Amino acid sequence: MQFKFTNCGEFLIIKLSGATSPNERLLSKQSLVAQLQEPHLKAIVDLSDLREHGGPYLLGMLNMIRKEIQILGGEMKLCALSPMLYRYFQNNRLLDIFETKRTLEQAKGRFGKKRYEDKS
């Protein structure tokens, strides 16, 4: 899996691409954590370029990113999930843990808003 970090104003966009594999979280933790040092971070993980979602492997990676951002007092949103990945999140009740939006712009607009206001 590859990671591309883009600072876009007040947001950090983390674009994941390629395929997930076993031990992805462990192999990538140091390089990811080094990029997540800004306190009160607003991070958006863009999943549009994932070739294969590898459910449990991707979940481990997303949990690690989410925890690191929460430690810094930040928030994380996900965007551009494939239909198959969205179903995986639904079936495993991950939509209760991760806030997801269809587009990057929708995700940007949701920071600071309560989850129960709008589930779109």
Image (cartoon, rainbow, N blue to C red):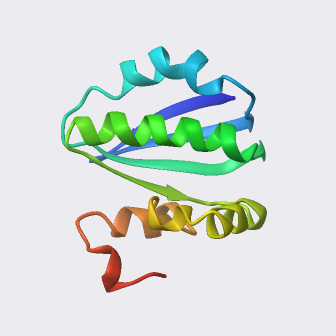
Residue 22 or 77: which is nearer the viewer? 22
Up/down of 41 relative to 35, above or below? below
Q: Is residue 42 left or right of residue 102?
A: left
Determine which quarter of the picture holds residue 17. Answer: top right
Which residue is at a point 22% across and 36% down the rendered structure image? Answer: 72
Q: Residue 111: percent from the left, percent from the top?
A: 29, 63
**Which quadrant of the rendered structure holds the N terminus?**
top right
Q: Is residue 15 left or right of residue 19?
A: left
Which residue is at a point 50% across and 40% down the rendered structure image? Answer: 14
Q: Residue 68: percent from the left, percent from the top?
A: 34, 33
Task: In the displayed orientation, state which residue is furthest to the front.
Answer: 92
Determine which quarter of the picture holds residue 116. Answer: bottom left
Looking at the image, can residue 9 be seen?
A: no
Q: Residue 8: percent from the left, percent from the top?
A: 37, 45
Which residue is at a point 40% across and 43% down the rendered structure image? Answer: 66
Which residue is at a point 62% across and 39% down the rendered structure image? Answer: 16
Up/down of 30 relative to 17, above or below? above
Q: Residue 6: percent from the left, percent from the top?
A: 45, 36
Up/down of 29 relative to 59, above or below? above
Looking at the image, can residue 19 be seen?
A: yes
Up/down of 45 relative to 57, above or below? below
